């Protein structure tokens, strides 16, 4: 599934480094308060349903409290039950933004993000960290990639190259270097790069779809960095 990596990539695209405590306060208001509020609504709903069906309301309350404290998106992580459900990403986003903010306090933030992802991968199935901290470590890498895409204006560059490539395909005079204007002959070889890049990405993505598996909610990457690269 690529939608969750895409979510963190987009979040990284709009990321701005902040002082650590300022970032914690801001992201707690924006992420953890909605997380707790939604968890409370879910608990109340399930308690009302249990009451209407003459079930153990107190037991449902304790189950939902445990799920809220664990903050796991999937109960398959070391048998941790129950899962909090789809709102796990709010907790994961809080922690990943904190890790990325701390990474930018170092000389090599990219290395810190890679090490966090590696640590998360190797600890999966050995140690369980609550509040989706382990998926957050992997998500930090996606956040960093999104940040770098914006910092280096890669989307704008890719857009210009794609337009050049389309022009080369649909404008026959430019396809023939001898008939192209002198000022454009040098740019023609570079215009084919988007199609080469698209072909490489297509092969990479198809291979990951057939052989790999990526489930961020319980931090599972069958092919590890290959799955991450394909998601990007």
Image: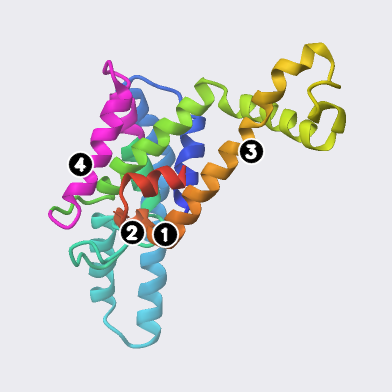
**Per the image, is 107 magenta?**
yes
Q: Secondary structure at mark 3?
A: helix
Task: Look at mark 2 in the image and give the residue it sits on.
Answer: 73
First in sequence: mark 3 or mark 4? 4
Task: Look at mark 3 in the image and give the residue it sits on.
Answer: 195
Q: Residues within 10 Å of mark 4 (few under 14, many from 20)?
A: some
Q: How far apart, in angstroms, are the residues tagged by discs 3 and 4?
A: 35 Å
Q: Residue furthest top?
A: 183
User: Looking at this view, is 161 or 86 the one in front?
Assistant: 161
How many numbered circles does the render carry? 4
Horizontal side, residue 1 vs residue 172: left or right: left
Q: How far apart, in angstroms, are the residues tagged by discs 1 and 2?
A: 6 Å
Q: Secondary structure at mark 4?
A: helix
Residue located 26% across and 81% down the image = 56
Q: How far apart, in angstroms, are the residues tagged by discs 4 and 1?
A: 24 Å
Disc 3, disc 4: CB below 8 Å? no
Range of the magenta residues? 97-126
Task: Look at mark 4 in the image and give the residue it sits on.
Answer: 119
Q: How far apart, in angstroms, are the residues tagged by discs 1 and 3?
A: 37 Å
Residue 38 placed where, x, y %?
42, 56
User: Looking at this view, is 185 or 87 the one in front?
Assistant: 185
Q: Residue furthest left?
A: 126
Q: Nearer the viewer, mark 4 or mark 2?
A: 4
First in sequence: mark 1 or mark 2? 2
Q: Nearer the viewer, mark 3 or mark 2?
A: 3
Task: Look at mark 1 in the image and give the residue it sits on.
Answer: 86
């Amino acid at each position: 599934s690529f939608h969750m990596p895409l979510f963190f990539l987009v979040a990284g695209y709009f990321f701005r480094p902040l002082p650590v405590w300022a970032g914690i306060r801001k992201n707690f208001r924006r992420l953890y308060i909605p997380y707790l509020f939604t968890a409370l609504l879910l608990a109340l709903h399930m308690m009302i349903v249990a009451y209407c069906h003459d079930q153990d309301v107190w037991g449902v309350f304790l189950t939902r409290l445990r799920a809220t404290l664990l903050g796991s998106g999937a109960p398959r992580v070391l048998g941790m039950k129950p899962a909090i459900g789809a709102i796990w990403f709010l907790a994961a986003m809080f922690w990943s933004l904190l890790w990325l903010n701390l990474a930018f306090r170092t000389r090599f933030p990219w290395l810190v993000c890679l090490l966090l992802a590696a640590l998360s991968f190797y600890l999966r199935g050995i140690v369980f960290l609550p509040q989706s901290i382990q998926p957050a470590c992997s998500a930090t890498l996606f956040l960093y990639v999104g940040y770098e895409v914006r910092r280096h204006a890669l989307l704008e560059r890719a857009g210009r190259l794609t337009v050049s490539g389309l022009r080369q395909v649909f404008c026959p005079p430019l396809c023939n270097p001898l008939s192209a204007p002198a000022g454009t002959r040098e740019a023609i070889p570079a215009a084919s790069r988007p199609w080469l890049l698209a072909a490489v990405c297509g092969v990479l993505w198809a291979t990951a779809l057939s052989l790999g598996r990526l489930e961020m909610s319980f931090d599972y990457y069958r092919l590890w960095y290959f799955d991450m690269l394909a998601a990007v």
